[in-house]
Image (cartoon, rainbow, N blue to C red):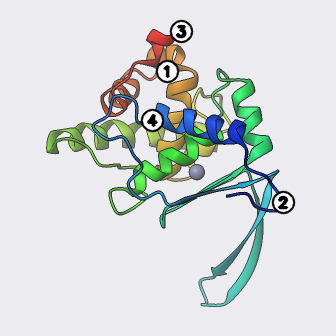
Amino acid sequence: MGCAGQQIDDEIRVTVAAQACLLLLNRKTNQYQKLQSILVYPSTFIATREVRDDLGLVSTNHIVLLGESWEQGKVVLAWDNVEKSVRNLRDGHNVVLHEFAHQLDSESGATNGAPLLQTRGAYKSWAHVFSEEFEDLQRIAARGGESLIDHYGATNPAEFFAVSTETFFERPAQMKENHRELFQELVKYYQVNPVDWL
Ligand SMILES: [Zn+2]
């Protein structure tokens, strides 16, 4: 659905769908179970949020966003940022992969960086690898160090999963080299090995 005057044409439909489908390719599903609508703005959009502080006071915040995913099955994208993501599929930044990873994450009932996995054992190794890598990134981000995975992933485990997904598909060789266990977890989850695509 187009917002703020954005017309939806086949270029937009195919560009968004093709990237969203990358996350489903070989998995035992061919749909985003919770997804109901995709809203596309021409450019960065302003979202209004009610925020409650520690004293219970509610204030309204306006934040500028490039993309957003809601647990209620909604993905919001800024088309200029989607185009930017597509122009460079090797820089580790991709708003479509990011927001659709959040949709997968939300299928478990909570968007917390732990999507639905196949087996009980899979959760154990996922939790182990992801929490270790997340804490590493938090430490690196805190001291302003360099990392392959964007520092935004240090925000919380949900963002870590979404940002790791961007890195996995866009910079797979580097991820395999520097974050081998995390890379293997994502190969198991996404059922693809993007290194083979290079
Ligand atoms: Zn996010």
Quadrant that contains the N terminus: bottom right
Read off the residue under disc 1: 175
Return the x and y of residue 49 as percentages of the image width and height: 68, 75
Judge whether 111 appears above or below 61 on screen.
above
Read off the residue under disc 2: 5
Read off the residue under disc 4: 23
Q: Which amino acid does label 2 sit on?
A: Gly
Judge whether 198 appears above or below 62 on screen.
above
Q: How far apart, in angstroms, are the residues tagged by discs 1 and 3?
A: 13 Å
Q: Earlier in the sequence, mark 2 or mark 1?
A: 2
Q: Earlier in the sequence, mark 1 or mark 4?
A: 4
Beta carbon of the mark 3 residue lies under 8 A of ligand 1:
no
Q: Earlier in the sequence, mark 3 or mark 2?
A: 2
Q: What residue type is labelled 4?
A: Leu
The structure residue drawn at horizontal position 47% and vertical position 57%, both measured from the top left corner, is 35
Residue at disc 4, secondary structure: loop
Q: How far apart, in angstroms, are the residues tagged by discs 2 and 1?
A: 39 Å
Residue at disc 3, secondary structure: loop
Residue extending farthest to the front is: 10
Estimate how packed mark 3 is, as few (under 14), some (14 to 19) or many (20 or more) residues with alpha carbons within 10 Å. Answer: few
Along the viewing direction, whichever of 150 and 88 lies nearer the viewer: 88
Along the viewing direction, whichever of 180 and 115 lies nearer the viewer: 115
Read off the residue under disc 3: 198
Q: Position of 130 compared to 12: left or right? A: left
